[in-house]
Amino acid sequence: MPFGRHLTRTARLAGPVILARAGLLVMVAVDSAMLGHYGTLDLAFYAAANAAQVVMILIGVGLLQGTVILVAQAHGARDHAACGAYWRVSFVHGAVLGVVMGLVCLLGRWILVATGQEPEIVKGAGHVLDMIAWGAPPLMMWVICTHFLEGLSRPIPGMLVMGGAVLLNVLLNWIFIFGHFGGPELGATGAAIATSLVRWAMFAALLIVVIRLPDARALGMNRPVSNFWEVSKRLRRIGYPLGAARGLETSAFAALVMFAGHLGTTSLAAYQIGYNLIGLVFMVAIGTAGASVVRVGNAVGRRNATDVRRAGWAGVLLIACMMACFAGPFLGLGTPLASLYSDDPAVLPLAASLIGICGIILVFDGMQAVLMGALRGVADVWVPPGLQLISWWGVTVPIGYVLAFVVGIGVDGLMWGIMAGALSASVLLSGRFVAVSRRPIVARY
């Protein structure tokens, strides 16, 4: 397949995946913006709780990533019956993982105390995590449904469900944060209640879509899985290292959030604004990475080495161009963007400075994410987490700490640490994809 066709097909698949993934961060952005105007303290509560739960969510998404990889490979090889078996087994994994995550959220106060947060933040963020806990199981089962549909190159339903979820989240925030329409005024805790309600609605809607697919019978959706434990082992063999990779990255970012907390409530609120904006745009990279997983996985299923390479580099070129387009507004419109989240005169200048640094980070952070997706498509799942460990914990965290606390440039130093880690990851993962894409193809489905 010509490189240009790979580029257009990746873009066509990436669009709905980007919108579906971005929806999760749009909801966080809406929560942050509405809480920022409600009160800086509530925004700080939400930031601390969100740092704790995001680590778990992204580890969970990584653990369940085997679904989209194996479904994409099987679909590329036209082994349609195997696709349904992967969904059924993965669904059980998602349910169990969601329950475990919910229980961990209920222990959130201990985690916050262990990271040295102030008692006021521990108390407020703990209430938020209590409400987040009961929305964890539906979120993980929703992830399984989206992975399954994306592996079949059918991302539109996930995008549409997410669009409805974003609108519902705004309405419920209006009710539970501010107490409108006769609802209780709960601030950050109300935002968490709204989030959990929306997650249950998202899961229910997408589950109906999956079980009512017109080719469900051909996909083996209704057949019992005779080799449940074998399929489960195959999914877990891919999921464990991918969960570790997600955990290494997001826990490093969570460590920086905790560092920001030690710089004070104002610094933490400002960092949450910058971190949320870069996270929101990063969903473009996550969506493109998801498309790259499918495109590369399809090529692996066809055992076409040239298409593996072209599909991978098409995704990298696509994300570099898209992220460059976002960099300009971040560099030039820091204060207006920050004012969307807060009108606190102490927070705004700090946040505006951080947003400018985020604009520089975007291109490299996007490239490393898509390279990880391309490597997942060929089921190269063990070495990339090691490269992530070097980049995020060997580069980002120590550099961020030194710049913030030793050099003394404060919260800006934490963002420069992310920049260093993203650049390191881009270089290391590029070399790994060059090496892996030259090897003989081994399909894992």
Image (cartoon, grey):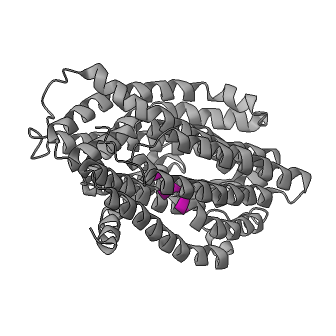
The percent coordinates of residue 290 (x first, y second) are 39, 53
Front residue of 96/79: it is 79
- Residue 245, by quadrant, is top right
The answer to whether one can see residue 7 in this image is: yes
Relative height, residue 155 to residue 397 (above, below): below
Front residue of 204/179: it is 204
Q: Residue 370 colored magenta?
A: yes
Q: Residue 443 colored magenta?
A: no
**Residue at 70 percent of width and 47 percent of height:** 257
The answer to whether one can see residue 201 in this image is: no
In the visual, does 94 lie left or right of 220?
right
**Residue at 74 percent of width and 60 percent of height:** 416
Magenta highlight range: 366-373
**Residue at 53 percent of width and 62 percent of height:** 367
The percent coordinates of residue 436 (x first, y second) are 46, 50
In the visual, does 306 lie left or right of 336?
left
- Predominant secondary structure in magenta? helix
**Residue at 60 percent of width and 78 percent of height:** 328
Front residue of 439/49: it is 439
Instruction: Please identify the quadrant where the N terminus is shown.
Output: bottom left
